[in-house]
Amino acid sequence: MNMKDLVSRGRNTQDIMNMAGLYANRDEAWGTPRAHGGDFRQSPYHLFPVNPLVPILKRFSFFTAYDVNTTNVWDETNSGSGTGLACQDGRGGAAKVVNAASDNNYYFYEGKYKNATLENAKNTWLIGEIAVKTAVSAEIFFGLCAAISGTLFDNRADAIGFYSDPDNDASGLLRVECSKDSTATQASTGISMADATTIRLGIAIGGAGQVAFSVNDVVKKGMSTNIPTANLAVCFGIRNGLAAANELTIYPITLGMER
């Protein structure tokens, strides 16, 4: 049955969209179709715009040297003589950073421009995949943050994201946080990273009032306090928890924002 047949049988546009698992907001231009996942507690892709006529969709694809450029794309900060972010061979695009072998050596990256700032009544999504060589001894962060004064691992005044803390839990356990003006709400996802194993991390932010964190497309935690109002950018990094070199591989990141 085609669209014409459905309409002729009395189905309106919203009925047809519902049958396709989509949702349309009649107040938007063209009724931008969105994924209908029930709500943010059930699906990290709930209300994600399918048609990019109105929303902003930014893809950080690690395919070329420009994608890891530290003059125009990323601000790079490091301690120790490791190897900075570099594109890798393999399917789909990936980049890897390798720390030097001393304890607390690190690399972290912030978007050059803080253009992922939250706004009331406008949803934001961040989805990406990472893999850590030795998860139990890695301190990582993946998410959104304001400009860092210090390190990503110790000085996140305004941030939303996933992190691990080997000093307090040497199991690769993923935790989540919302931090505003250096006051953080933090929680465990209950999921631990495995060595050299890709894991998908998702953040869905409803306007500027609620955040849902997902691991491998399953929502694990929600938060509604200490959501930052500062200008934010995509950020990620890894710090050694032992005197041994560690590695973070990052795959293409998708940032979705409503106009």
Image: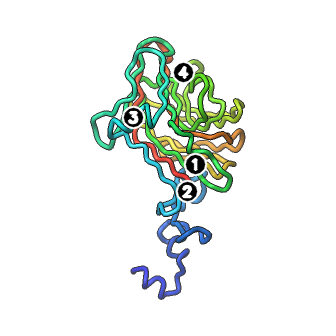
Q: Residue at x 52, y 66 (%)?
A: 32
Q: CA distance from mark 2 to mark 4?
A: 32 Å
Q: Is residue 242 visible?
A: yes
Residue contact at pointers 3 and 1, CB within 8 angstroms: no
Q: Which mark is residue 46?
A: 2
Q: Amino acid at mark 1?
A: Ala
Mark earlier in primary sequence (1, 2):
2
Residue contact at pointers 1 and 2, CB within 8 angstroms: yes
Mark earlier in primary sequence (1, 4):
4
Q: Is residue 137 visible?
A: no
Q: CA distance from mark 3 to mark 1?
A: 25 Å
Give percent across and percent down for residue 156. 62, 29
- Residue at which label 3 appears: 68
Q: Nearer the viewer, residue 14 or 95?
A: 95
Give percent across and percent down for residue 223. 67, 43
Q: Which mark is residue 166?
A: 4
Q: CA distance from mark 1 to mark 4?
A: 26 Å
- Residue at which label 1 appears: 204
Q: Amino acid at mark 3?
A: Val
Mark earlier in primary sequence (2, 4):
2
